[in-house]
Amino acid sequence: MNNELMKYLANRGIEIIKRAKPLEITENEEMLANVAGCWSANADEIRCVVQARCDKLREKLIATDMPYETPVTRNALLEIAGILEDFERIETEFKARDKDKPDDADKDKPEEGT
């Protein structure tokens, strides 16, 4: 991969490495809670950032893309919009797991018969 691209991504905290399997946020409880909390608290702001990026790509698609570039730009739009779906899926997973957890108040109660 292009060295400048690798530097650009590294400066933004993105590693391009081959993983045995994709990084899965839902496998790490702390990461899951943090991402779900971020989405819950800032969904409108995150949507705004994603929308701004999609707007730029849409303008590129309409104004300057050559016919052979159109599929790539359209795919980029879908991938970026997919980030919102990822946030929603992560939040749903967090809520489902949180609902299944026993309440802390129940944890402090002594078991019956002891």
Image (spheres, rainbow, N blue to C red):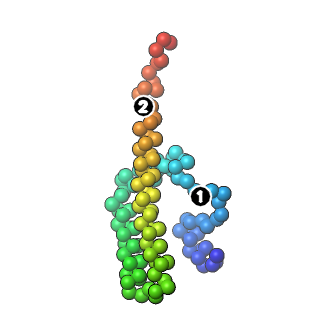
Distance between the alpha carbons at the discs numbered 1 and 2: 32 Å
- The spot of residue 3 in percent (x, y) is 64, 77
What is the three-letter code of the residue carrying label 2?
Answer: Asp
Labels 1, 2: front one: 1
Numbered disc 2: secondary structure: loop
Residue sticking out furthest to the left = 44
Q: Is residue 11 placed above or below 87 in the rendered structure?
A: below
* Direction from residue 42 to residue 22 in the image, left or right: right
What is the three-letter code of the residue carrying label 1?
Answer: Pro
In front: 101, or 12? 101
In primary-sequence order, the first of circles 1 and 2 is 1
Q: Residue at x 62, y 56 (%)?
A: 21
Give the residue number, with chain letter if any, for mark 2.
Answer: 103
Q: Is residue 27 placed above or below 18 in the rendered structure?
A: above
Q: Residue at x 46, y 26 (%)?
A: 107
Q: Is residue 107 placed above or below 18 in the rendered structure?
A: above
- The spot of residue 52 in percent (x, y) is 37, 72
Q: Quadrant of residue 42?
A: bottom left
Numbered disc 1: secondary structure: loop
Q: Is residue 64 placed above or below 57 in the rendered structure?
A: below
Q: Quadrant of residue 23?
A: bottom right
Q: Residue at x 45, y 47 (%)?
A: 93
Give the residue number, with chain letter if any, for mark 1.
Answer: 22
- The spot of residue 60 in percent (x, y) is 41, 82
- The spot of residue 38 in percent (x, y) is 41, 54
* Direction from residue 4 to residue 43 in the image, left or right: left
In front: 2, or 79? 79
